[in-house]
Image (cartoon, grey):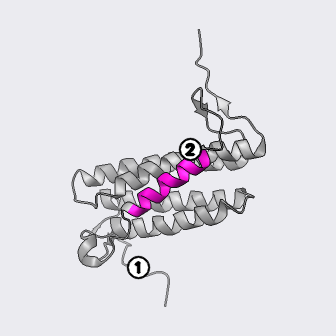
Amino acid sequence: MNIYTKTGDSGDTGLFGGPRVSKDHVRIEAYGTVDELSSHLGLAVVEIEWNELRPLLQQIQCDLFSLGAVLASPDPEKSGTNLIGDQHVANLEALIDRFDAELPELTSFVLPGGSKPAASLHLARVVCRRAERRVVSLASVNSIPSTVVPYLNRLGDLLFVLARWANHRLGVSDVPWHPSVD
């Protein structure tokens, strides 16, 4: 089987269980950004040296693939792709609580950075927030399962906590934001 089909050469693509749409359709933007997020997490995995984070991030990548399937289908219930549920959101909340419990209290806004693993997780976080915005745009014109936006919202929170955790684990301070004064 060839990897190329040539069916998208005219600028459109097929939805799972649905019609063909333009490659710049709001649905394609949504699941494409989720795919981009997964790629950034893949980069974070190779930057991170702790065994407790690698499998966690790889599981999130698997969940994001499932989320992409949800978004790639005009009717996830009918196509059997409604694969992200309340338990996924609850799992993210538990992870946030677990890793945040190890961190010093947050007393200021922080800039992305500190260490290379933290910077990588911060980059994934901002892509996650963009994916969330793209999904909200999709939800304004099409019905999506009610757990999709909360999942991405919690994932963005988790990635922020994990970035701080990575700095803490390495003994590197978060970079505090200091407003410019003229």
Please, is residue 13 above or below residue 141 in the view? below
Residue found farthest to the bottom: 1
Q: Nearer the viewer, residue 152 or 52?
A: 52
Question: The residue under label 1 is which amino acid type?
Answer: Lys
x, y percent for residue 138: 29, 54
User: What label does residue 6 carry, if any?
Assistant: 1
Can you see residue 102?
A: yes
In the picture, measured across the screen, residue 54 lies left or right of residue 65, that is right
SS for tag 1?
Answer: loop
Q: Which residues are magenta?
A: 87-100
Q: Name the residue rendered at 35%, 63% in the picture.
A: 23
Q: Name the residue rendered at 35%, 58% in the picture.
A: 148
SS for tag 2?
Answer: helix
Q: The C terminus is located in which quarter?
A: top right
Can you see residue 33?
A: no
> Which of disc 2 and disc 1 is earlier in sequence?
1
Q: Nearer the viewer, residue 169 or 136?
A: 169
Please, is residue 17 above or below residue 21 in the view? below
Question: The residue under label 2 is which amino acid type?
Answer: Phe
Q: Which residue is mark 2?
A: 160
Question: Disc 1 and disc 2: Cα gap in Å?
Answer: 40 Å
Q: Is 77 within the magenta?
A: no
x, y percent for residue 45: 66, 61
Q: Name the residue rendered at 30%, 49% in the picture.
A: 137
